[in-house]
Amino acid sequence: MDAIQELLNLKNDEQAKHLMHFFKTGKGQYGEGDKFLGIRVPQTRCIVKKYRNNTTFPQLQEMLNSEYHEIRLCALLIMVLLYEKNNDENIIRLYIKNVKNINNWDLVDLTAHKIIGSHYIKTHDRSIIDNLANSGHLWSERIAVVSQWSIVKTGEFGLLLELCEKFLTHKHDLMHKATGWMLREAGKKDLKVLLGFLDKHAKTMPRTMLRYSIEKLTPQQRKFYMS
């Protein structure tokens, strides 16, 4: 039995209905048309652990092409473990090739910093992140921003601040949440970085971005920036 078959065997129609609603798969919504098996993430992670050392690149590509969200997630989580283990550049290429299949916020948020962010830390080549940020494609743009999660932990903030300024006028709430979240993470590492950005942009930031960014500030600070 392979990973795909094991995941198919875990299919739960009732849970799938809930997930399709939660991940906004209706017409005109950001996850339009995606299909779910109804598998919880801890179950998927068990499959990942079982198959992480014996899944080939063709098998990963087959999984990434799947119509089912959880099968794509399983492939991406295997890729995270493989990249953490050996920094294989083939993982980077496979990830970039399949951006169209990394098409919801959980797929991005569980993997972008561990693959694209880690690649940047290793190489300091920002071309991949720049290409994603300039793509005009929602999920590519979110990958670029969430990739910063690993980077800001090293104390490097310049690229994140550039991206947050770039996306100040972005129309999608999912980008406001991502940029605000990453600013908050930067603030955990160096509060001056967050406060400097807020002092410059709080008046014009999307409200969602602002709220996410100030969550860990004092009540007085939150009140100041919200007003």
Image (cartoon, helix red, strand yellow):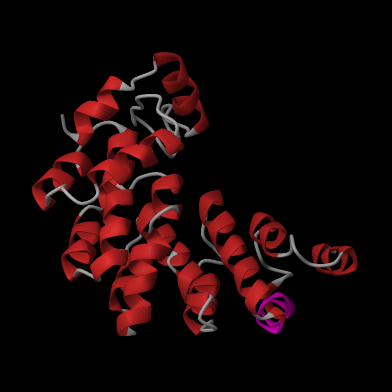
Report if residue 83 is visible in the image.
yes
Q: Magenta region, mostly helix, strand or loop?
A: helix
- Please report the bounds of the magenta region as a residue range: 192-199
Residue 157 in the image: x percent, y percent?
Answer: 54, 81
Residue 42 in the image: x percent, y percent?
Answer: 45, 37
Name the one closer to the observer, 126 or 42. Answer: 42
Residue 109 in the image: x percent, y percent?
Answer: 45, 54
Q: Which residue is drawn at 51% across and 66% down?
A: 167
Q: Residue at x 29, y 72 (%)?
A: 128
Q: Relative to 8, is 207 on the left or the right?
A: right
- Quarter of the picture holding the N terminus: top left
Q: Residue at x 27, y 21 (%)?
A: 9
Please tell me in which quadrant of the rendered image residue 85 appears: bottom left
Residue 98 in the image: x percent, y percent?
Answer: 22, 52
- Count how many numbered circles sit on residues in the image: 0
Name the one closer to the observer, 39 or 81. Answer: 81
Q: In this view, does 10 lie above or below 216?
A: above
Q: Is residue 193 above or below residue 208?
A: below
| Residue 193 sits inside the magenta stretch | yes
| Residue 51 sits inside the magenta stretch | no
Q: Is residue 78 above or below residue 196?
A: above
| Residue, far left | 58
- Quarter of the picture holding the C terminus: bottom right
| Residue, far right | 220
Q: Is residue 18 above or below residue 141?
A: above
Please tell me in which quadrant of the rendered image residue 224 appears: bottom right
